[in-house]
Amino acid sequence: MTREAVYSPPPSTTQESIASPPPAIGDADAETKVEKLGGAAARIGWSHGLLHAFDSLYVTVAEGNKSVTNGLYRLRDTDGDDQNDQSELLFALKGGGEHGPHNLVVGPDGRSLYLMGGNGTPPPADVNRRRPVVTKGIDRPLPHGFESSKHSVEGWVLRCDPDGGGRELITSGLRNSYDLAFSHAGDLSTFDSDGEFDLGTPWYRPTRICHWVSGGEFGWRGGSAMWPEYLADSVPAVVDIGPGSPAGLVFGYGTKFPAKYQRALYACDWTFATIHALHLRPHGASYRAEVEELVGGSGLPGTDIVVGKDGALYFAVGGRELDSAIYRVRSVGEDDVGPESGAGTEFSPQDRGLHSLRLFGLGHSQTARQPMVVFPIPVD
């Protein structure tokens, strides 16, 4: 693998929306072309999440500002002039900043959106469909610690229609995950934050990769009220990473990498300037993972990561007034980089039924149309 810078913007203190098509791979003389977006896109920013889907640009406004309300916006070109002339607030969100509303993705059914909210963001008040069990007040009989007397559903994933309607809380109980990614199997993963102030305490919970499941509760609570992972009501992590600051997340589907890396989940750690490659393997009805450092080094505080149409990985760096840039990661060896087959990610016959039921619970239409066979769970 090799890494190369493709764009470094000039210093700026303003919020601007830009388009930045990357230069062609192998063209040493090519320059990245940058275009400022006009229309409604020029009047919006302060965003922690962008998504182009359903002929729209979705923008999660998360930073405090004097121009627009925090929440999820939909920008559209209604007159065909290639400019987004319409901006619509689909729903407001009270949270903001680094623990506010974050990124969003299209669901596996191709008809829905999944939005990530940090632990400083209550879900919209009018969400009546909730899969996790909702309780009020502290739910562990331990002395109150830092913020431990409050139980909420902050740290959640919300599912909605493209127009913002049909909102449903899917899962909750994480601290402050920024991004989320669906696998080809329809499983939803995230990279969750730790509570750095808890480091060294018995209840410290490191940053970790989590497999979001329908109705799952991951047990984030402030201070000593944190749920231990062994509680029967809590969903365990896929793998613990350690101290850090989770940011962007993406599966390697579509990369021109060796097959192992096409299947990998890539996770940005802002604090330690590292992009982890996570190689998932089935474990029961969920997963475990091996962790490998793909990219790391001084001056690379990764904020987000995507797969380009050219088969390369692109990641952005910056944040908190640091210099920003966009980098490209591509394969340069002699390894086979043809489309991967998916081998090595199959579930056993016993676990396949459990996995199908869980996907059915998420409402994936493809899974719902398939016949399901449920096997008994072996008991040791």
Image: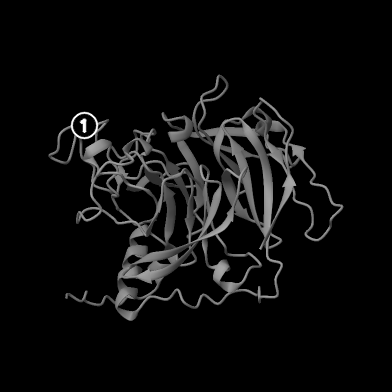
Let me know if residue 53 appears in the view.
Answer: no
**In this view, which residue lies farthest toward the bottom?**
349
Residue at horizontal 84%, vertical 51%?
30
Where residue 162 appears, as percent x and y from the top left, is 51, 46
Describe residue 298's horizontal placement relative to residue 269 as left or right.
right
**In this view, which residue lies farthest toward the top?**
66
Residue at horizontal 37%, vertical 64%?
359
Residue at horizontal 60%, vertical 33%?
87
Describe residue 77's horizontal placement relative to residue 102 as left or right.
right
Quadrant of res 85 = top right
Describe residue 157's horizontal placement relative to residue 274 as left or right.
left
Q: Answer few, some or many: residues within 10 Å of disc 1's Cα (few below 14, many 20 plus, some between 14 and 19).
A: some
Where residue 255 appears, as percent x and y from the top left, is 63, 64
Circle 1: residue type:
Ser
Quadrant where the N terminus sits is: bottom right
Describe residue 363's horizontal placement relative to residue 41 as left or right.
left
Quadrant of res 341 = bottom right
- Secondary structure under badge 1? loop
Residue at mark 1: 149
Residue at horizontal 38%, vertical 71%?
282
Where residue 125 appears, as percent x and y from the top left, is 34, 33
Let me know if residue 375 appears in the view.
Answer: yes
Quadrant where the C terminus sits is: bottom left
Q: Relative to residue 143, is residue 284 depicted above or below?
A: below
